[in-house]
Amino acid sequence: MQFVKSKLSVLTEQSTPYQLKLIELQRSLQEHTSSLIKLVNSNNLKDFAVTKTDAEKTLTETKSLATELASFKAVDGVGTASISELDNITTEIARTTEERLKAEEDGRAADALMKIRLQNASRKLRELEGGMKKPSVAQWSRYQFQMQG
């Protein structure tokens, strides 16, 4: 009977709370994964800042749950390496996405500058062409006048 009581104690005091924390950790990991996907798909730096904050919150929650889970007697430091790896992945994704967004922004600025320069060059060429045609028209008129007279 003592054996059954001890096993029942393990089940109710350790196993069930552990399983509940494990489910919470799984939910938190899924939420963090969703935040990382949103972070990668950011279209501008403003959206990036908002989604990065969300990703940092979900990472903090996940770390907290992993620490709580590791505190159970049945678990000996399980997940600490995985959580630090998740932290590194999150940092790398955020850095890469921010660099991509800045590069895209710089590319758009360069494109706008090139369009302005091309418009200015086109305008100058039209002015130059117009300036070249005026003397030709005047010369042609003089030539016609000389031919008639």
Image: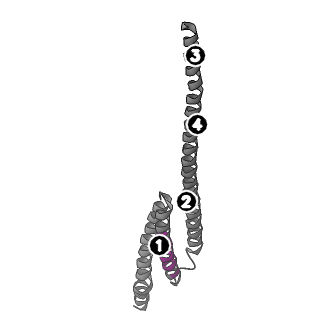
Q: Which residue: 56% across, 21% down?
A: 138
Identified by mark 3, the residue type is Arg
Residue type marked 4: Lys
Q: Earlier in the sequence, mark 3 or mark 2?
A: 2
Helix, strand, or loop for circle 4?
Answer: helix
Q: Which residue is mark 2?
A: 97
* Quarter in which the N terminus is drawn: bottom left
Q: CA distance from mark 2 to mark 4?
A: 40 Å
- Which residue corresponds to mark 3? 142
Q: Indicate the quadrant where residue 34 lies.
A: bottom left
Q: Estimate the x, y position of residue 22 in percent, counting from the top left.
A: 45, 75
Which dot marks residue 124?
A: 4
Residue segment shown in magenta: 54-67
- Disc number at residue 58? 1
Q: Position of residue 59 (x, y in %)?
A: 50, 73
**Residue at the bottom extreme, as displayed:** 2
Along the viewing direction, whichever of 127 and 109 lies nearer the viewer: 127
Using the image as rendered, state which of residue 61 and residue 20 is in the foreground.
61
